[in-house]
Every structure is written in C-alpha cells, then in structure tokens.
Image (cartoon, coloured by chain):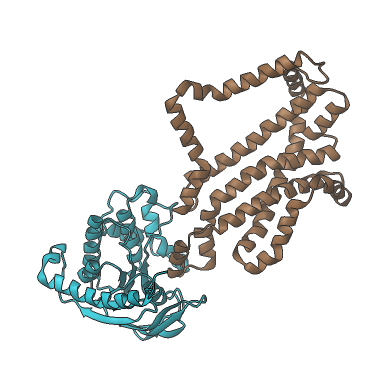
Amino acid sequence: MTATGKSEILTTSPRATLGAAMARHPAAVRLAPLIGLTWFVAVWHLLSLRYPPFILPGPASVMARWVEKLADGSLIAHIAATLSAALPGLALGALAAFALGAPIAKSPLAERLLSPFIVASQGVPFIAVAPLLFIWFGNGLGAKVLICALVVFFPITINVIAGLRSTSPILRDLFRSLGATPAETFLKLELPSALPFIFAGLRVGGTLSMIGAITGEFLSADRGLGFMINLGNGLYDTALVIASVLTIVLIALGIYGAVRLAERALRMARWAA
Amino acid sequence: MLIADRISHTYPNGVEALRDFSLRVARGQFVAIVGPSGCGKSTLLRIIAGLIQPSAGEVRLDGERITQPSSRIGVMFQDAALLPWRTVEQNIRLPLELGGRAARPVAPATRRSLIAELIHLVGLGGFEQAYPHELSGGMAQRVALARALITRPPVLLLDEPFGALDAMTRENLTALVEGILRETGTTAVMVTHSIAEAVFLADHVVVCSPRPGSVVGNVKVELPRPRAWTMESWPEFGALVGRVRALLTQPTQATARAKLPTQWP
C-alpha cells in the first residue's frame, strides 16, 4: 500500500488538485498558463522597446531568428549534437546510479565504502572539472557525455537508494515466509516498490542532463546549442542567444514529459506483475 | 504435530520477549494464543514461522526442526500485506512464483482453476481484476487468506489478522476461516487479543503472561463444529470466555499494582 500511496503523491495528486480547482473555476484555471505566458511576452515586448536589440531583443525578433535557424536546418543539427551528448550521458549516469545505489541500499559495508564518494561527487564543481575531462578524454563526444553523466548521477543515486529502502517490512516478511530467493525479492518486491522514486530521480536527472551537455559545449565544441549560445554572445546576436536558451528549456521540458510518459506506460503495462 | 519446545527469546536490544514458552498442537487442531499486548505472542508466531531464530528452544513440525521459513507453514499477517501493484488474482498466485517454484511451475490450467476455486471459496467473485486500494479491509484479508491457502500448507499461522476490522466483518471472516480450516483439516495457531474470537475459533485457548511471555494456562474449548456466532449467547461460551479472562487478568493486575509508585510525586 505504501508504494502506491507514495507514487500517487508524486504523480497524480497535483493533477487531482488541479482537477478540483478546475471544477471550481473552470475557465480561469484552464487558461491560467496561457494568461501567464501572454503577460510574460507582453512585458518582455514593452521592455524591449526601451533597449537596443543587442541588449534585449523583442519576442518577435527572437521568434524570427528561431524560425530562420530552423528553416536553414542548423537548429536541428545543433539540437541533435546536444542531445547526442545529453541522452547517452543520462543513460550512463542512470546506469552508474543503479550500479552504485543498489549495493549501497542493500549492504552497510557498501554504504560505508561508497557513500563518501557519492556525496563528494555532488560537491565537485563540475564546471571547473570539465576542462580536466577534456584533457583526459579529448575534445570529442566522450568528455561531454561524461560531464552529463556526472551531473545526473547524484539525484538519481539518491532516489535509487531511497526507493530500494522504501520496501514495507511486512511485505519483506511475507516474501521471506514464502521462501523467496534474494533475486525474486529484488525483482518482484524491492524494484517495483522503488519505481516511483527511480522515476522521480530520472525526471530531475533528465532535465539536468541538458545543463551538463550545454556546459560541455560551452567549454569546447563546434556545434550544439551551447556552441550556438557562445556564437551568439560573440557576435552580440542576443536574439540568437535567447532563441537557443528557449530551445534548451523546451527540450528539458520534453525530456521531463517523456520520462513521465514512460512511467505511465510502465504502470499501464503492469510491468511489475 | 507442531511443537514449540521451551522457547525463550531476547531481542538484541535486551528486551526479553519470551521465557520457556511451550506449545503442542495436534494435526488439524486450532490453537489460539491470547495475552496482553507486548507479551511476545507475535514473536512466538514469527519464531514458529521460521522468520526469527529463538535464543533458546526449538520448533518442530512432525519431528522436523524448523529453522527457516517452510512451504509447509503459511502465514497471515496483521496487515493483509498485499502488493499494491498486483490485482487480486495476481496477489493470490504470488506464492506459486516464489521460492524457485517458477522453475517448476504449476500447469497454467491447474493454476487458473485453483485460483478461481479459492476466489470463490473466500467470496471474492467479481473482484479478480481489482487492485488492493479498491478493496475494503475485510476483502483485503480475504485475499490474504486465499494467498495463504494456495500452496495448501498443512499449518497456518494467523497473527491478529482480524484486529483492524470492524465487528461485523470480523464475525463474517472468523466464521469463514473456521469453515475453511475445518474442511481442509489445516493445523492453525492464531495470536489475538479478542477472547471471544479465540473461543469461537479454537480447540485450545492458550493464555500468555505479560512480558516475558510464558504460558499461564490452557482452556480447552469443546463447543461443537461448525461454529456459529449465535453460540456466543450460549452459557458454555460465556463460561469459557470467563475462564480465559480470569487467567488473563490476574497476572496483569499484579503487574499493574507492582508498577504503581508507592508515593505519587
């Protein structure tokens, strides 16, 4: 029961609250995001009238720059370059998080041995360490993937550990009384109980992986959204910088949504059964 | 014959839960253990289930020593302990998938008819595809009962399985359990703090002292089977409840007196 309770808090309750709110003020609440966005764009536009475009370009010129980059195909190429670092980085970080988080959750020895490193990994200022990685692994994709992996590693690990430890003691007793092997207990009890936590970690990690990739491209790249921002900064093409940043935000939201969809699909497929 | 032989148990934190607790349960008999809360009766059940090792003494089932969970002993816990991500049907078949049993599976057709039969037996027809959060407490315990029975264990241990239910549901479920155990000839040990429930279900009611738990007395129940809750108004039923209560209250009051400070601060 506990696991469902938790997963519902994590996934469905905001929707339920929104649903209840919609019942009270249907139109206003449903349109709220749109209203907020309109205000934001309007204020941005008014502010942009007071400054030269290299300081603050208006929404229209940013949009124009975005469409132009999209039309000549370069935006897609940059997005592809960034994702080719971010997604493998996310996968690598998640894999490492699982490989270290699972033993830490299960064994006190592993916890004493490994957790100092895990916590230390969070303290590492990765933006300062990144140049080292370029020295060690070259200017190619490898170093950028590693930066992403480092960035996403910590939040996912913490969630894997918390999730694998969230198993209800009574269910543990039940599995023991039924003579379940350690592998059966892991696959049929601990892992399904941990899933809501693991997906919460993946959602955070997924959005962070974009930041990792952009950082890498900032330091050394000839393509990618980070490179595009660098280019825009160099040319005082502020519209290009803002267009790139908005693209990054959209992609991060997309990754977040994709993880949510994967979680829902998994639950629908009753994977754990 | 299920024998608990001079079981003593002290937890690592120094709490002495049981001292020299002995119990003999003949095949097909129902023994209920009643006692004040914290008397170590749940500990005793966990020891019989092989979930924990006693500090001293041993448990034997038909002469074989129990040191770890056995497929011949089923357990019903206080909480229904259902997997929230599995349907009623999937929860009931869980025991068939564990303990390496998946390697030598029950034929699917046999399994399906077994599950259907059990679902019918515990009165859950129509709820095969429901999830635990859609069930009431009583229905969840029916699922737990069906799950405990699917491996046809000769011994069933019940750890206050009806404690959290309302009175009506409790009566229905105890009557159901009584009927099923009688028909299947299952040996049962139940821990409870309801005297009426103990008398209703058991052949013997064993009364347990406050911590460290040991046997204070044993009341033999000779009410006819099948039992019905209408028997509660019989004089014999009342007399049995009275005898159990007498055994139960004496030591408790003695402890209560001993614990009172002689002078209030």
In the image, is residue B66 above or below residue A197?
A: below
Q: Is residue A14 left or right of residue A210?
A: left
Residue B224 visible (yes or no): no
Q: Colour of chain B?
A: cyan
Q: Is residue A228 left or right of residue A97?
A: right
Query: Which quadrant of the figure contains the C terminus of chain B?
Result: bottom left
Q: Residue at x 62, y 38 (%)?
A: A256
Query: Which quadrant of the figure contains the N terminus of chain B?
Result: bottom left
Q: Is residue A127 left or right of residue A20?
A: right
In the image, is residue A251 above or below residue B22?
A: above
Q: Residue A174, how many percent across, how many down? A: 43, 65
Towards the viewer: A71 or A236: A236
Q: Residue at x 50, y 78 (%)?
A: B14
Towards the viewer: B217 or A85: B217
Q: Residue B86, how many percent across, how many down? A: 42, 53
Q: Residue at x 75, y 42 (%)?
A: A212
Tag count? 0
Q: Quadrant of residue B186?
A: bottom left
Q: Quadrant of residue B226?
A: bottom left
Towards the viewer: A128 or B39: B39
Residue B20 visible (yes or no): yes
In the image, is residue A229 above or below residue A112?
A: above
> Which chain does the brown colour mark?
A
Q: Report the residue that reaches farthest toward the top.
A: A49
Q: Residue A50, how many percent across, how many down? A: 78, 14
Q: Quadrant of residue A26?
A: top left
Q: Residue at x 79, y 24 (%)?
A: A240
Q: Residue B253, how many percent across, how many down? A: 30, 75
